[in-house]
Image: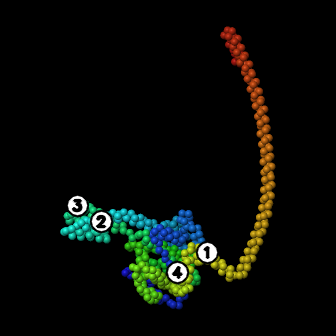
Amino acid sequence: MRTSNAIKEKQTYSEIMNTNKTITIIYKHLNFKNDGKGKAKLFKSLAHSLRISPTNKNRIKQTKILEWDENLAHTNLIYSPLLGTKALRLNTLTEEQKVQIQNSFIIKVNDEQNLKDKCSESLDALRKYKAKINKWYNSLTGGSDSLKGVLLKVINEKEAIDVRHMMDVLGQFEFARKNQKTATFEKYLELHNHSIKNRSDISRSKIIVQEAFFKIPKRNGVEVSTTDLITNIHLFYKNNFPDYPIKLIVFHGDEIGHHPHIFVDARNRRTGKYDLLTAQKNFVNDNIDKLKSEYPDAEPLDFSKREYLTKKLQAQYFQSLFYQHTNLMLDKYNIQAKKLEKTIEHNARMAVIEEDAKKPKIERAASFWNKQIIDLTEKLNNQRGGHRALLNEKIKLENQIKERISERTILDELISLKNEKLNSFRTQFEEFALSVSDFVLTFFKDLSRDEVNKRKEKAQSSYEILERKLDADELIEKLANNLNAKNASTLRSVKNTS
């Protein structure tokens, strides 16, 4: 078993002074699986930690922003490898930057999963060719032991195979349908090496990310620096699980009891396996001796048996080791974190806390808004004189409201009277406008009628004159026909000028 890097600090847990003030702390971690439900929970948790604003697209509820105090947004910090090597104020990031960090947790995993899904087609082909090699192997009899040995070697090989070397080895043997079987052998070797090269440990049931947070409840009445709170949980994971990258740390100073969240990649950077949970089991067993002071009968756990008791003990041991690690940091404050004894009162209190944890954060007893209500209630209870002043102020405000209502009633009556007068004027104006319109229409109708009659009379007179002219022209023409050309021309000229 690999030697653990746990608790490298020089001072040990047993050296913490017993005179230190005892406090309680909260440490909890959550595991997110590589399935739809797990990724959805991870996205939701990241949205909360990163303070991503609600939109219709991301399906974040508007009530989420009521879980913290917006006036303390400047106290939130963030560390992400995507942003550099230093912590930044969370409120200096744009929404696009925060969403990019959120998406970065899933993109790489999805790409790896898609690659594995594509490789499944190659695996199907590999199984078919392996079946052909097995069939060839089983068909060999007599003096073919050496050839059978070569086939058995490639069938059982778990690592990459030197294709050229094995093809040279196979070429030394004689067998039926040599060209066809040689081609089958070579294809199998190529598919085998391809599957080894693209082998991935990821599956839908694997844990891809672990989130942990550490809080010193406000009821303890102690103040620990932001730097110490962040460094404490950072070093715990960095020292004890160095092969698992820290993807994100967010410090929340805008909630009741400021605290850090840490998100750890469950993929081992050296082996590529998603085995953080296995590493944490080894961590517990490697440090079992450090638990003897609290658990005298503690022994390495047998994780080959999936038993509830084993899982429960692992959680208790892991938490105790985190307490020991934390107490090395808390010693300079002359305080010591200690687990509460398993009394009836403690169990009842834990049951309430666990039930409370199932509720939305805004509804929890220790939520930001509930804390505001509690503080206001305490302030009123402690300041009875202030309560009387508030009551007097309330009466004063009520009287002012009554006055405003009375004034509004008078104004409403005046407005109603004005509206009546306005409606009367509007009616009178409409009647006047209608009468004027009728007069104008009648005037122009009469004027138009006289004009038409006059035009008719003129037209009739013109017609009569035209008829008389035509009769005169006809008479002139008849007379001209009886005259010589010169006289006829003179007479016709009279017709044209008339």
Amino acid under label 1?
Trp
First in sequence: mark 1 vs mark 3: 3
**Callout 4–callout 2 Cβ contact below 8 Å:** no
Q: Quadrant of residue 489?
A: top right
Residue 147 image offset from top left, x and y in percent: 22, 68
Residue 382 image offset from top left, x and y in percent: 68, 82
Q: Which residue is mark 2?
A: 131
Q: CA distance from mark 4 to mark 2?
A: 55 Å
Q: Is residue 151 left or right of residue 52?
A: left
Residue 443 image offset from top left, x and y in percent: 79, 38
Residue 285 image offset from top left, x and y in percent: 41, 83
Amino acid under label 3?
Arg
Q: Residue at x 57, y 68 (%)?
A: 61
First in sequence: mark 4 vs mark 2: 4
Residue 24: numbered disc: none
Dot 1 crowding, Cα within 10 Å, few <14, some 14–19, many 20+? many
Q: CA distance from mark 4 to mark 1?
A: 21 Å
Q: Which residue is mark 1?
A: 369
